[in-house]
Image: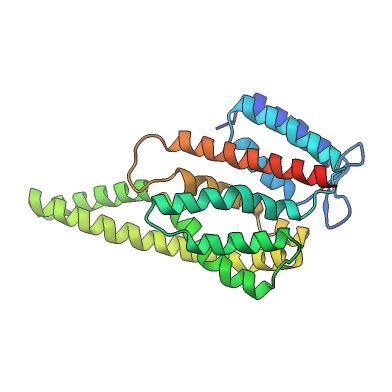
């Protein structure tokens, strides 16, 4: 991923144009020297998407996105969040769920709420909370590093079995049983904890179209979770980094397109 000095400098310049004069107005944001204000949620989302892409692609994307921010004079409508989830993030996550044995139904429920919100019906906080908790649980189930955790649990189980003279056949049986049990339990705990911790704060932001509340819900972390959910598999195949970069690229392209639609409609 893009961690080179060139990439860091390019994005620093991008952010400097948004942040030069400190906090802006209108729900909180960052104001540039040209008076352009972007909402607070946008910066961590853009930073996460930038950092997840290869250097050249990230730099080109930053220029493109800043152009759209300028067209909007920094007034990025909250509808961009709904549009991005509706058209980009959730279709990707539904497909990821299907690959990993899920139905994607809980994600489709949230997608339907984003579709309503994009059409002018924001829904209620209780509707969002009821939909987001199971959806985020599925996102974080997919984002959990299952293959790595399973490999670690298997190695630990084998070491324990060898130290206790289980014998070759029983060692493998025990390792397979323990790794599946342990990794599954840890994955569920990880998903449950993140879903419970985040669903209500995000629900309130979505229901109220509250840009500041959304910024306070760590939206950049969701970008990372979405990319990992797309990239991870239950069995390691050596392609995780490539899939992750592709996922960030897809999410970044989708956000740029959502900004373009918002600018065209403004």
- Which of the 4 image quarters holds residue 255? top right
Kindly identify the residue that appears in the image at 8 percent across and 51 percent down.
169
- Which of the 4 image quarters holds residue 212? bottom right
Q: Is residue 134 left or right of residue 169?
A: right
Residue 7 seen in this snapshot: yes
Residue 243 vertical placement versus 10 (above, below): below
Q: Quadrant of the N terminus?
A: top right
Q: Nearer the viewer, residue 249 or 41?
A: 249
Q: Is residue 109 left or right of residue 95?
A: right
Q: Nearer the viewer, residue 224 or 109?
A: 109
Q: Nearer the viewer, residue 181 or 63?
A: 63
Residue 196 seen in this snapshot: no
Q: Return the x and y of residue 95 as percentages of the image width and height.
A: 47, 50
Kindly identify the residue that appears in the image at 50 percent across and 39 percent down.
244
Kindly identify the residue that appears in the image at 63 percent across and 69 percent down.
128
Q: Return the x and y of residue 11 as percentages of the image width and height.
A: 71, 33
Q: Return the x and y of residue 113 as percentages of the image width and height.
A: 64, 64
Q: Return the x and y of residue 40 as percentages of the image width and height.
A: 77, 51
Kindly identify the residue that appears in the image at 38 percent across and 52 percent down.
100
| Count of residue discs | 0
Here the colouring is rainbow
């Amino acid at each position: 991923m893009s961690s080179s000095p060139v990439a860091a400098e390019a994005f620093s310049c991008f952010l400097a144009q948004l942040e030069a004069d400190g906090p802006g107005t209108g729900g909180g944001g960052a104001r540039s020297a040209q008076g352009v204000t972007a909402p607070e949620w946008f910066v961590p989302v853009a930073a996460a998407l930038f950092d997840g892409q290869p250097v050249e692609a990230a730099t080109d994307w930053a220029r493109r996105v800043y152009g759209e921010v300028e067209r909007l004079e920094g007034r990025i409508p909250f509808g961009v969040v709904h549009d991005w989830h509706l058209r980009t993030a959730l279709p990707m996550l539904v497909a990821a769920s299907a690959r990993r044995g899920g139905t994607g139904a809980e994600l489709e429920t949230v997608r339907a709420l984003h579709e309503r919100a994009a059409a002018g019906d924001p829904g209620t906080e209780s509707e969002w909370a009821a939909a987001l908790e199971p959806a985020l649980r599925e996102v974080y189930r997919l984002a959990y590093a299952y293959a790595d955790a399973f490999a670690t649990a298997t190695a630990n189980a084998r070491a324990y079995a060898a130290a206790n003279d289980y014998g070759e056949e029983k060692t493998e049986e025990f390792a397979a049983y323990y790794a599946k049990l342990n990794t599954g339990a840890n994955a569920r705990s990880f998903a449950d904890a993140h879903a419970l911790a985040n669903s209500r704060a995000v629900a309130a932001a979505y229901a109220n179209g509250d840009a500041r509340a959304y910024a306070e819900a760590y939206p950049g972390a969701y970008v990372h979770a979405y990319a990992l959910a797309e990239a991870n598999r239950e069995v390691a195949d050596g392609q995780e980094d490539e899939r992750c970069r592709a996922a960030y690229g897809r999410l970044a392209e989708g956000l740029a397109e959502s900004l373009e639609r918002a600018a065209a409609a403004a």
